[in-house]
């Protein structure tokens, strides 16, 4: 029995398995490097905060809570710590944080409702419906 190919005709060469693996590894590395560079670029840097729902809460207190997050990459930003930081501001009851691409965070605040005064020494403080002291 003779071989499939006729004598004198060269068999088609196929790249070795090592070259194929090397090619796909280089392609994956280049794609990963491009993605990493794009995510670290200033294209999605957090520059603006859009705050809704503040009547009693001071905007400067909310902005002070948000200051550590300014300039960070919006795509990589975890919103849970941002919401927790704003939630520690007096008068803030509930917070909703969403990303507004390419450069902003939208913060919606639901404030506590004051229902009574509380006296501590010579100072008066607001109390909310849960009986917690809100602010002077």
Image: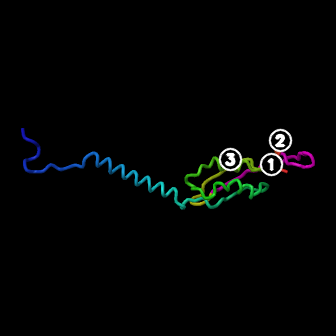
Q: CA distance from mark 2 to mark 3?
A: 21 Å
Asked if residue 41 lies in the magenta stretch, the reply is: no
Would you say the residues marked 2 and 3 are in contact, meaning their CB atoms lie under 8 Å apart?
no
Residue 114 on image: x %, y %: 83, 48
- Dot 2 falls on a residue whose secondary structure is loop
- Dot 3 falls on a residue whose secondary structure is helix
Q: Which mark is residue 93?
A: none
Q: Earlier in the sequence, mark 2 or mark 3?
A: 3
Q: Earlier in the sequence, mark 2 or mark 1?
A: 1
Asked if residue 112 lies in the magenta stretch, the reply is: yes
Q: Nearer the viewer, residue 37 or 3?
A: 37
Residue at the image position 32 percent from the left and 49 percent from the top: 22
Q: CA distance from mark 3 to mark 1?
A: 20 Å
Residue 44 on image: x %, y %: 55, 59
Occupied quadrant, residue 52? bottom right
Side (left or right) of 8 relative to 134: left
Q: Nearer the viewer, mark 3 or mark 1?
A: 3
Reading the image, the residue beneath label 3 is 84
Q: Quadrant of the N terminus?
A: top left
Occupied quadrant, residue 31? bottom left
Q: Which mark is residue 113?
A: 1
Q: Residue furthest top?
A: 1
Reading the image, the residue beneath label 2 is 131
Task: Say how many tags the image has.
Answer: 3
């Amino acid at each position: 029995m003779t071989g499939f190919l006729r004598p004198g005709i060269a068999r088609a060469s196929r790249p070795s398995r090592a070259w194929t693996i090397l090619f796909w590894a280089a392609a994956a590395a280049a794609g990963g490097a491009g993605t990493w560079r794009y995510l670290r670029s200033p294209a999605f840097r957090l520059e603006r905060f859009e705050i809704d729902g503040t009547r009693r809460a001071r905007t400067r207190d909310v902005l002070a809570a948000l200051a550590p997050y300014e300039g960070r990459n919006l795509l990589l930003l975890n919103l849970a710590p941002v919401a927790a930081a704003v939630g520690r501001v007096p008068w803030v009851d509930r917070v909703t944080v969403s990303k507004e691409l390419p450069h902003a965070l939208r913060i919606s605040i639901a404030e506590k409702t004051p229902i009574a005064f509380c006296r501590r020494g010579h100072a008066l403080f607001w109390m909310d419906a849960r009986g917690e002291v809100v602010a002077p």
